[in-house]
Amino acid sequence: MVVSWLADGEPAARGAASAPAGALSALRQGLRPQRPAVRFAPAGPDSVPLDPVPDDDTAERADATTSTFRDAARRRHHVHHARLGGLRPGTRYRYTIEPAPSEAPATGEFRTAAAPGDPGEAFTFTCFGDHGTDEPDDPYGTAASRAVVGALDRYDPLFHLVIGDLTYASLRQDPARAWADWFRMIAPSARHRPWMPVAGNHESERGMGRFGLTPYQAYFASPPNGAGPDYEGLWYAFTVGRARFVMLFGEDVCYQDHGEVYLYGFSEGRQTAWLERTLREARADGAIDWVIVGVHQVAMSTAAYHNGGDLGLRAAWLPLFDRYQVDLVLCGHEHHYERTHPVRGVVPDSTELTPLPALTTEPAVLSTAPRATARPVVGSLTARPAGAELERIDATTGAVHVTIGTGGSSTPSSEALFDPPAGRVVVEAEKRHGAGRRRTVYRLEAAPWLAARSTEHPYAFAALRVDPGEPGGTTTIRVTVHDSLAPDEPPFDDFMLTRPRPGEAGSA
């Protein structure tokens, strides 16, 4: 567990004064600056979350490390990260930041995952991508950007996955202000649970380090990937219970040129080699049932006027997802909700490497002139009738891809879907003489992989309940998808992934 916070002196919200940097202020007063740290302890039954953790022998202390970078205006920024060790499973903890930040609460609370086999081993996590803020001068976010923060907390997730394009900082005049605004906006939730990031195409900022990702890497202290400092934090994995989560940086393999820095192939194969090793080890581990991937870009999409699926991602990573039986792929990038049938392999003779649905369904028909249309469209979700049987999907037949880039972006794609359903695939990024950004070349394909999509809910999040079940029985992931602006309404999509759980070693 890592507690991270911005140093005093970071850009203030619009209309607010920026506090002086804590260390510099102390020096001016002739004082020795206090080293940033976090004091933490198990929360007692009567503890008050906002009260500081007592400075006694019941508490432990974790010193922080500080990441520093200069932005394009040559301003220096500091981010503190304190790694809390020795945590007990299934325990609620309180923490206090020292010295207290001037513009943010100094206290928080979180809980750790239960130990394998404990009664509380089941857990919930939430996810969405493409967020932005609700600040008045942010043209890329909306009021939904803030609303979703409170909405997802109703489900008390153990952690949250934010699947890329967190702040759209690369498009803003003052990227550091955009980041500071975003951290302030999510703080009511992030004080109580980890927000685990995935880098998207709008995380890279021109002129900010070798790959434009120096600020992103400074803001987050993700688990290490062993690829060296240039690549740290851009892809990583972590385990919760019997699920292995694998977070990827899709710019590395995607053809589309849609960021400030074109990063196709930037890791020179490091990420793909790490991915294969990580998936292989996960599937060889008898304590892992579920393999869940997070990546910003999508392999499949029925959006007519947005990004499209990417052939580069299909060619580089989908064969690995097939080989090592990835169960679930969570994506953003497209600003609508859509999910696929389980897919494995490719449609025969497909030059676009169209993923092959494992379920026997009527294939979607590609008309000679598919069109983007407003609601309703073929494949749109409708409310499940009361008493209707929950859709159960056998995860061993292939990976289900869920697109949920619905965090709050001001450019939803939910009303720009092909009808009848069709896929739009990035097949090339054509470099033009004297031009800056490469021209995206698309081809259309049939969409037999499409299972469901929504035109009615442009802003949404998913809540996923992972239940390990019993040895020798069935383990499940229940996925419910909720409108961020109407969180009290029933979920507009609701399905369950199932997978057999092996029996205990040595059992008959």
Image (tube, grey):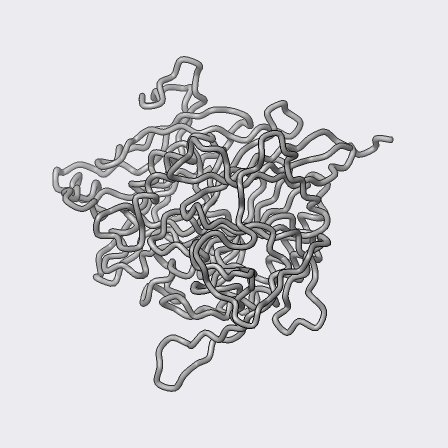
Q: Based on the displayed image, in which of its 4 quarters is residue 47 positioned? A: top left
- Residue at x 64% of width, y 40% of height: 391
Front residue of this view, candidates 16 and 444:
444
Q: Based on the displayed image, in which of its 4 quarters is residue 27 positioned? A: top left
- Residue at x 50% of width, y 70% of height: 255
Residue extending farthest to the top is 46
Q: Is residue 288 visible?
A: no
From what the image shows, is residue 128 above or below residue 447? above
Q: Based on the displayed image, in which of its 4 quarters is residue 32 positioned? A: top left
Front residue of this view, candidates 68 and 200:
200
From the viewer's perspective, tell me whether residue 378 is left or right of residue 375.
right
Q: Is residue 427 visible?
A: yes
Residue extending farthest to the right is 508
From what the image shows, is residue 221 above or below residue 274? above
Can you give x and y, in whole percent of width and height, for residue 276 in the image? 64, 58
Front residue of this view, candidates 471 and 93:
471
Give the tally of numbered discs: 0
Front residue of this view, candidates 225 and 328:
328
From what the image shows, is residue 97 above or below residue 223? above
